[in-house]
Amino acid sequence: MPELPEVETVARSLRPRLLGRTVERVETSGLALRQPIDRAGLEAACVGARVLGVTRIGKYLLIELSRGDVLLAHLGMSGHFAFAQGGAPREPHTHAVFALDDGGELRYVDARRFGVLSVHRTLEVRRSAELRLLGPDPLSEDFTFTYLLECLSASSGVSIKNFLLDQRRLAGLGNIYVSEALHAAGISPRRLARNVDPRRAERLHRTIREVLSASVERRGTTFRDYVDAEGAWGENQHHLAVYGREGEPCRVCGAPIRRIVQGARSTFFCPRCQR
DNA sequence: GCATTACCCTGAAAGC
DNA sequence: TGCTTTCAGGGTAATG
């Protein structure tokens, strides 16, 4: 389940083999992802265009193309990019293929089809339906302690878990890193966001960045499907404090980690460390 | 404004 | 062994 560190790792693994390449051909499976793929739009933007950059905003990948277009990708639950030689057998669930001028192919594979592939004009992509409502990226300078504090105090009855999952407030956190950041900050996931006091909020602001940065260093968390564009697993799953550890002892105090469901998503926490 | 539920989807795991 | 059911979750939408 790709969140910010996984998407950042994918961006880093795409750059060496994609920058400067020209797209010669585009193929699609004809099956819809979360939205239908606009094949004609994809071809118009990509074919004959050179890749100028690969960046990330929240959980979105932006592949910047010459001629002023951007290919926007969200990996959903199970999406990944893979490089292959042209003509090599395709993995099941390959939904888009970008043939490159070096004989290779960049492929988008997504079993569950929760991902998104769309194209936009570079100057307008920030105003696209996908990006326009996103809050600041937690690893950017825009995510300040003041911003977090203002959002917390402006919230009404939402739990801190659901507060942090809302991409309109903060873009890039998902189920894994919300649980991890709250544990590191000693905050119960059930606490109302507005009741997080400034001292704990400061700690949370720090732990969000630390948890994400550490996972980026470890090339992300591979729980089920996630691999980078070279097919490599991440290493952060070996360092999780609470996520996926129901019943196991807390690494800090030894109390059994608990799992609860909030908004139909699992939340893992230590009932002793987190108040 | 918020919580809950359903939906999209497939593969893995569990249950029978 | 083999079939069926359950579960996982990012984002969105409908409902209460």
Image: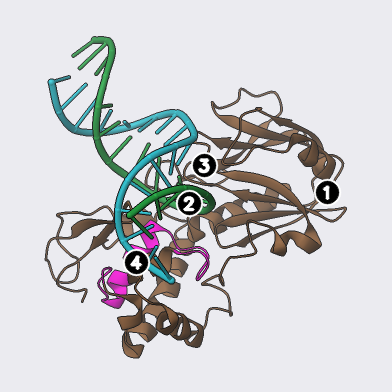
Chain colours: A brown, B cyan, C green
- Which chain's residue wears label 2? A
Tell me which residue sits at (80%, 51%) in the image: A20
Q: Nearer the viewer, residue A202 or A133?
A: A133
Q: CA distance from mark 4 to mark 1?
A: 41 Å
Q: CA distance from mark 3 to mark 4?
A: 22 Å
Above or below: residue A229 compared with residue A275: above
Residue A2's tag is 2
Tell me which residue sits at (34%, 73%) in the image: A157
Residue A22's tag is none
Please identify, in this view, whether the residue under mark 3 or under mark 2 is nearer the observer: 3
- Which chain's residue wears label 1? A
Q: Label 4 sits on what residue type?
A: Lys
Crowd class of label 4 (few under 14; some 14 to 19; many from 20; radius 10 Å): many
Callouts 3 and 4 on one subunit: yes
User: Which residue is tagged 3?
Assistant: A114
Badge 3 vs badge 4, beta-carbon distance below 8 Å:
no
In the figure, is residue A269 to the left or right of C14? left
